[in-house]
Amino acid sequence: MAKKADENNGMTQLNQEIKEGHFKKMYLLTGSEHYLINQYRDFLKNSLVPPDDTMNFSHYDTSNISSKAIANDLITLPFLAEHRVILVEDSGFFTKSDEDLLNAIEKMPDENIIIFCENDTDKGKAVDKRGKLYKLFEKAEGVYNFNTMDEKTILIWLKKKITSAGLSSEDAAIFRLYESAGPDMTSLSNEVEKLIGYCISKNNVTVKDVEEISVSKTEDKVFEMIDAISKHDKKKAILLYNDLVQLREAPMKILVLITRHYNILCQIALMQEEKYDSSHMAKTLKVNPYFLKKYMGIAKQYKYKELLAAANSCADADYAIKTGALSDKDSLEKLLIKLM
C-alpha cells in the first residue's frame, strides 16, 4: 500500500513520487499556501505532459468550469501519449456533491490523471472533508496539503533563493524581509526577486537594502493605523484598513506587521520605565530613530499591561488562523475590532 501523504504538508511525498515517476490517477492539492500549491501543480503537469501537448491536457478554472465537460475529458483516452491530464482549479466541487463527476472519476481509465487545486481558505470554496469527492481522493491517498510554513523554514528558503542568485546576505536582512512581507510565500517570492535585482551588482544583501526596496507602503499604513487606534480615532483606522484591502495586501502580512509593532511598543514601554535613553532604545531594538520617536509617542498613550494585552491578542489571532478556527481575514478583522 502506498504511503499516505503527509497530513500537514504534501511536499515530501509528492517530491518522491515525481522523482520516481510513480503517479496516481487523482491528486487534490489544497491548503493555505498558494505558492506551494501552484509550484507543485506545475511540477506535476510538466512531469506528465510536454508543454506543447494540447491534445492531452485540459485546464479548467473559474472562467470555464463545467462538470459535464470535465466528466467527458475524464473518460477520453490519451491520443498517442502515455497520459491525459485534466487540471481543475478553484472549482468549488469539494463543497457539493456532483454524481456525474464522481462516476466519471471512478470510471476514468488508468492512463488519465486528474489534478484538483483548491483554495482551502476561501469560505465559498473551502474543501469539505466530509464530502463524497474528498472521501474518494482520500481513499486513493491523493490528498496533498500545503499550508503556511513555519518561520524557520521560510527563512531558510529565502536564504537559499538569495544564495542561488550568487549573493551573500546578512541574517538580519533575511529576517527583515520576512518581517516586512509576512509569511505569504507569493509575496515573499516577489519581494526577494526585486531585492536580488537591486543587489546583483554589489553581491551582498543588507538590512538597508531591504529597507530601501522591500519595505512597502503597507508598513507605513499599518503604523498609521496603530497610531490612529492609540488616539481612539476609529474612523481613520478603518479608512487605513480599507486602503490595505484595496491594495490587496494579504491579511497574514498585515497581522505580522501589527504584531511586530505591538511587540516593539511593549519593549519601549518597559525601557521607558527603566529610564533608558532613546539612543539605547534605537540600538537595542534596531529601529530607525525617526520611527522610534513615533513609537515613543504611541507608547505614552498606553499602560504597559494594555500593550501586553494587545500583543497577546495578536498572538491569539495568529493561533486562530493556524488552527483553522478562523480565516485569516476574519481573525484580522476581529483583532482590529478588539484593539479599537
Image: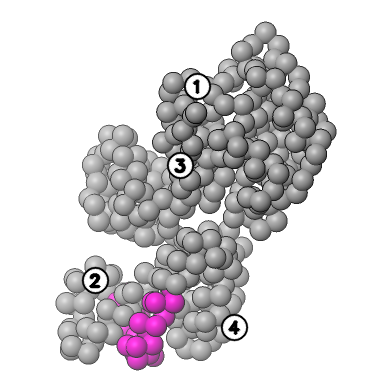
Q: Where is residue 129 shown, x and y percent of the image? A: 63, 50
Main SS, magenta region, reads: helix
Mark 4 crowdedness (10 Å alpha carbons): few <14, some 14-19, many ≥20:
few
| Residues at circles 3 and 4 in contact by the CB criterion of under 8 Å | no
Mark 3 crowdedness (10 Å alpha carbons): few <14, some 14-19, many ≥20:
some
Q: Where is residue 93 shown, x and y percent of the image? A: 72, 44
Q: Against 294, is 65 above or below?
A: above
User: What residue is at 45 percent from the left and 52 percent from the top?
Assistant: 148
Label 3: which residue? Answer: 6
SS assignment at label 1: loop
Disc 2 and disc 1: Cα gap in Å? 51 Å
Q: Where is residue 32 shown, x and y percent of the image? A: 53, 51
Q: Which of marks 3 and 2 is in front?
A: 3
SS assignment at label 4: helix
| Residues at circles 1 and 4 in contact by the CB criterion of under 8 Å | no
Mark 2 crowdedness (10 Å alpha carbons): few <14, some 14-19, many ≥20:
few
Label 1: which residue? Answer: 22
Q: Nearer the viewer, mark 2 or mark 1?
A: 1
SS assignment at label 2: helix
Residue type at mark 1? His
Q: As drawn, is 106 to the left or to the right of 196?
A: right
Q: Which residue lies furthest to the front in this view?
A: 1
Disc 4 and disc 2: Cα gap in Å? 31 Å
Asked whether 126 falls inside the magenta stretch, the response is: no
Q: Of the numbered discs in the image, which one, if any, rests on residue 285?
A: 2
User: What residue is at 56 percent from the left and 84 percent from the top?
Assistant: 234
SS assignment at label 3: loop
Q: Which of marks 1 and 4 is in front?
A: 1
